[in-house]
Image (cartoon, helix red, strand yellow):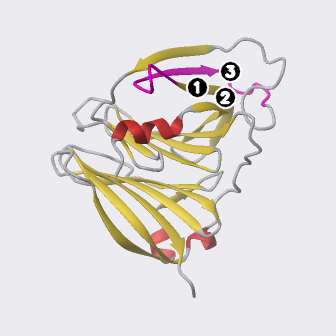
Amino acid sequence: MPGQWQNFLCNLGEWRGSFTTMAADGVLGASSPSVLTLASDDDDRLVRFGLRRWPAGTAMAVGGGPADGAGESSYAVEQDYRSLGRQVVFFPSGAFNKGSLQVAPQTAFGGEFGFIGDNRRHRLVLLYSEAGSFEQLVLIREFRAGSAAAERPATRADQLLGSWIGQAATISADWSEPVQCDCRLELGRAELEGLRLLPDGGFCHLPEQVSHREAFVLEGGWLLSSGRMERLIRRYDASGAWISATHAVLSKAPV
């Protein structure tokens, strides 16, 4: 399996999109146009990151990002990377999972799930308060600049129902070699009750409360097409410590 840095490089490019917040009650807010760039230098040993965002409600261009005439961005940040922190895990497709390493009392907590494919990136950020209660979700829909990539339809429950088969790779917090295995997922009505269905083929499963005294799991998912699903799963133990991350690529099983 390729190394973490090589997996990270799968995300290189200019990504035009938007950030949309969803409150704990499921209400979507206005979208903020964005342009994110990841450019390599020094023979791929350096990656330059840049992000610009415009105010929520700013008109968006077809294909993502701000429309012509949107003016200057209201937020901009740049950063250079030569290495990756322990809080983020990249998989061979470029999909990644990032989050707090430890749940701690009176400390904000969060996790991010990033999917990539067909000139698209679909990202979910889950944010919890200092008291450990779920506060909001940020949905980030990105399109490779110059491509004809389109947004996926909002996820419907019937698209997820049934049997799914595929491959999963798990990386543990001790950074031992990834464990790969065949996997099968059965989704019935009961399993869907805990899922939040999102625009652009997204879905997620999250606890309403997290604690350093109880084990829990965070999950993000994306339907890249009607018969293909990807899942990213981040697990924490009963002390609130991160223990592993899994990326599963699944296809709908033949009936």
Residue farthest along the top direction in this orientation: 72
Q: Is residue 124 above or below residue 231?
A: above
Where does label 2 land, which residue? 32
Q: Position of residue 33 (x, y in %)?
A: 69, 28
Disc 3 is placed on an element classified as loop
Quarter occupied by the C terminus: bottom right
Which class describes the residues within 10 Å of circle 1: few (<14), some (14-19), or many (20+)? many
Q: Is residue 223 left or right of residue 46?
A: right
Which residue is rendered at x = 52% and y = 15% of the image?
77
Q: Amino acid at mark 2?
A: Ser
Q: Is residue 177 visible?
A: yes
Where does label 1 land, which residue? 37
When asked about the image quadrant of residue 131, the answer is top left
Q: Is residue 46 magenta?
A: yes
The stretch of residues the image draws in magenta is 40-60
Q: Position of residue 132 (x, y in %)?
A: 32, 39
Residue farthest along the right direction in this orientation: 69
Nearest to the eye among marks 3 and 1: give it. Answer: 1
Of residues 169 and 57, the one nearer the viewer is: 169
Q: Is residue 134 above or below residue 68?
A: below
Q: Amino acid at mark 3?
A: Pro
Which residue is rendered at x = 33% and y = 26% of the image?
83
Which class describes the residues within 10 Å of circle 2: few (<14), some (14-19), or many (20+)? many
